[in-house]
Image: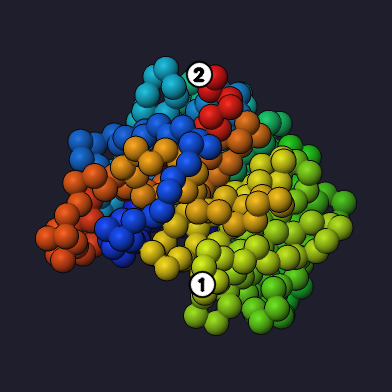
Amino acid sequence: MRMEISIHRLVALLAISVAGVLVGTGMAGDTYSVVELGALQPDGSSVGRYTDSVGGRVVGNSGFTHGTDTRAFVWSPTGGMRDLGTFPGGDYSEAAGVNDAGAIVGASNTRDTMRGFVWNARDGMRELGPLPGDSASRAFAINNSGEIVGYSSGKLGVRAVIWSAKLEVRSLGTLPGGTYSEAYAINNAGQVVGMSTSSSGTRAFLWTRQDGMVDLGILQGSESCKATRINNAGQVVGSCLLGAGSGAFLWSKEGGMQSLGSLDGTAYASALGINDSGQVVGASDSALGARAFLWTKTGGLQDLNSLIPSTQDVMLVQGVHINSRGQILAIGGVHHDLTHDRQAHIDEGHAGPVHVFLLTPVSSVH
């Protein structure tokens, strides 16, 4: 149930989805302009995870197509993509979140374990220590106060944790009856969301200092849910397993958990990001394969590929994050060189590189 975005898995998604390219995706719009961020390695892949609203920074990880030589990166409109390196002895790192001050969090391996990090331009990469007695940690998000969330793991299991701005670590515990938890996101009010096992199954949770960890419930027909993001209004998004598929949800204190549906009524959808206006992005199956989506209260679920210029030779398979400016971070591939002959031979080894794309509302670029 971890919120993983694997380069290898996305390559496979693109391989499955390119058949839809050959059929066509219909008339595309010009709601968003598109910038391809590239990769650290020539012909490599990149996965974006978060973009801030102030500096236009994007963070994620980039390596070769099948995930080797993967490094955390930060991208900016003026500086391009920068390798953040690893801890001494490590050969893998990933960046998962950035705040408005430019502090970046993620994880890197060392010679013998995995540790969360916080990085800034002055101090470089600093370690986020695990709970006493644990051996590993990982960070997923940071707010503008410098509070960081993720998990700590060791012989006693895995626990969701929060690090203070002074990098002091605290366990968030689990839901009643649970033995495992992870924290994926934190807003500027210090509210945290993630997933925890419980006596009733795996559940999405909301943690606050006042109430501790609270079960957010489940979608009808589900026994397992996780929350992936929370905005500053306290709205939460995530997904629940539904039989062989999954359903995307939006939760609020007033309305509880509601399903966002899926493209073409298919069996799979996952909500991955929400901004302060309540716009949601994620991924859904469709008749043409995996597609990135945008959900709004007035427009419902829309294929992001229908909202970008038809001149863009791009297939977007996941919408990962949307910031307060309405900019969307999406993952996909360039398909201008695909042919019917190539399609007949596409597999995980020949789907081409996965890249990060930054979509900006057209009205904000004029």
Q: Secondary structure at mark 2?
A: loop
Q: Residue at x 62, y 66 (%)?
A: 261
Picture quadrant where residue 312 is located: top left
Q: Position of residue 174 (x, y in %)?
A: 70, 65
Q: Is residue 261 left or right of residue 62?
A: right
Q: Residues within 10 Å of mark 1 (few under 14, many from 20)?
A: some
Return the residue at label 2: 122
Asked whether, in this view, residue 42 is left or right of residue 260, the answer is left
| Count of marks, rendered view | 2
Depth-wise, is mark 2 or mark 1 nearer the camera? 1
Callout 1: SS: loop
* Residue 361 visible within the image: yes
Name the spot of residue 44 as percent of width and height, x first: 24, 42
Give the residue displayed 19% in from the left and 46% down from the top.
Answer: 337
**Quarter of the C terminus within the rendering:** top right
Type of the residue with mark 2:
Arg
